[in-house]
Image (tube, helix red, strand yellow):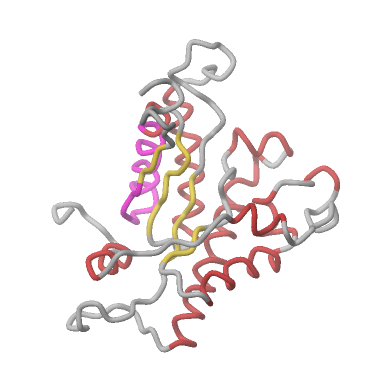
Amino acid sequence: MTNRKYTNRRYLDALEQKVLVYDGAMGTSLQVQNLTAEHFGGEQYNGCNDFLVISYPAAVEKVHRSFLEVGVDVIETNTFRSNRITMQEYGLQERVIEINETAARQARRLADEYSVRTGLAPLQAGRPQGSPQPPSAAGYIGPSGKLPSANDPQPSDVTFDDLAEVFREQAVGLIRGGVDVLLIETSQDILEVKAAIRGIHKAFDETQVYLPIQAQVTLDTTGRMLLGT
């Protein structure tokens, strides 16, 4: 970790001080708000939680604030499905960078506002170990819906390079929006994780912003991923 080049160590510096507590389920928290098609921007976008950062940001802000108020250390952007493949379902594939950047700016702004209001100044050298740290914003990168390692032709009908490009695009938006860490989440295929990391590194080179990557996979009760890894 110490040999890597980071332009933002905020998340890593906080992690060296304590165990960091993340927020909870964004989708569940949005669902209980009983949002209508109008909140999503029309029937064609109904149910697209990720688009709420543009169509009705107050709903997402309410969720972020609720977790900040109970003291979480990290809030995740509302970008679980915000990649070109899944956004195509709603005709939003050309707005991927906009959606991710908007979501990241929202999470960044709320985390910073909370820090100022509660007196949690940015981490500085010499601060006593274990002292409260300002919350971080994590750029949430969920699965593409594809399984590149599968034998079934439908979920595997994407090349590794194309998949890496999908994640590069999403990462660029999140980086531009000011997240502290990129979180690869709910991964079902280890090859997709590799493609996501490859794409993120391309985004680092493109933006010249270098952040930590936190990659997490989904395992069943036997400790295996969906395809047996």
Residue drawn at 60 percent across, 45 percent down: 96
**Residue furthest out toward the left:** 3
The number of discs equals: 0
Query: In terms of secondary structure, what is the magenta stretch mainly?
Result: helix
* Image point (52%, 18%), residue name: 156
172 drawn magenta: no
Give the side of residue 183 with respect to residue 145, left or right. Answer: left
Task: Give the residue at x 46% y 21%.
Answer: 148
- Does 207 appear above or below 112? above
* Nearer to the camera, 225 or 61: 225
Q: Quadrant of residue 137?
A: bottom left
Instruction: Provide residue 178's location: percent of width, then percent of height.
Output: 45, 63
Residue at the image position 40 percent from the left and 45 percent from the top: 203
Q: Position of residue 52 (x, y in %)?
A: 70, 57
Looking at the image, which residue sits at the far front?
221
Q: Quadrant of residue 195?
A: top left
Residue sitting nearer the eye, 8 or 14 = 14
Where residue 99 sits: x, y (%)? 61, 53
User: Which quarter of the rendering shows the C terminus?
Assistant: top left
Compared to residue 187, the image places residue 115 above or below, namely below
Is the residue 104 above or below the residue 150 in the image? below
The magenta stretch is 194-214
Tell me if 97 is positioned left or right of 119 in this view.
Answer: right
